[in-house]
Amino acid sequence: MSLEEIIKTYTPDVKIVSTVTNLSNRFKNSGLTNENITVAVFAVMTEVSKLKQIKHSERRQLAIAIINKLVEDICPGDDTPLELTLKQIVPTLVEQLEEMKIPLKCKCFA
């Protein structure tokens, strides 16, 4: 499933598709690692938090699905140890950032 298809299962908002695609391109250049996954998660959560027409639980699911797709697309090879590790930590990372209640409009991780 493409990134656009994943997003469209939750929302018809096309702006987020463009924003997440730009984010994906940014990380394709630098790569995703366990050191910078937090930056990617925070950026995706910032964009997903703007989607007020969907429920909070769906925004969380969407953020996790987007990040996992980015991990699949950016990490070279199929089911590499790095890919598997990043996919395992993403749900917990999303929950922890939500619990911290950091204002997602903050640019402190950008």
Image (spheres, rainbow, N blue to C red):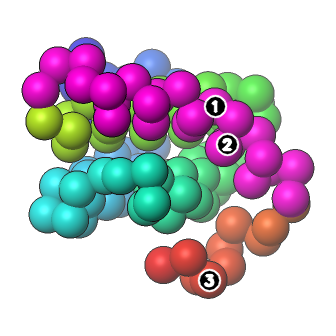
Nearer-N-terminus badge (2/3): 2
Q: Are marks 1 and 3 in contact (CB under 8 Å)?
A: no
Residue 46 percent across, percent down from the top left: 59, 60
Out of 42 and 89, give the one closest to the viewer: 89
Magenta stretch encompasses residue 73: no
Type of amino acid under label 3: Cys
- CA gap, disc 1 and disc 3: 21 Å
Question: Where are the magenta residues, as a range?
Answer: 77-100
- CA gap, disc 1 and disc 2: 5 Å
Type of amino acid under label 1: Pro
Residue 89 percent across, percent down from the top left: 58, 35
- CA gap, disc 2 and disc 3: 16 Å
59 versus 109 height, above or below? above
14 versus 47 height, above or below? above
Nearer-N-terminus badge (1/3): 1
Identify which residue is drawn at 56% across, 36% down: 90
103 relative position to 61: left or right:
right
Identify which residue is drawn at 39% across, 24% down: 84
SS for callout 3: loop
Identify the disc placed on residue 94. 2
Out of 72 and 56, give the one closest to the viewer: 72
Type of amino acid under label 2: Val
Residue 103 percent across, percent down from the top left: 78, 70
Out of 52 and 34, give the one closest to the viewer: 34
* Crowd tier of the residue under label 2, counting other residues whose Cα lies within 10 Å: few below 14, some 14–19, many 20 or above: many
SS for callout 2: helix
Q: Quadrant of the N terminus?
A: top left
Q: Are marks 1 and 2 in contact (CB under 8 Å)?
A: yes
SS for callout 1: helix
Identify which residue is drawn at 54% across, 26% down: 88
* Crowd tier of the residue under label 1, counting other residues whose Cα lies within 10 Å: few below 14, some 14–19, many 20 or above: some
Judging by the rendered image, the residue that carries numbered circle 1 is 91
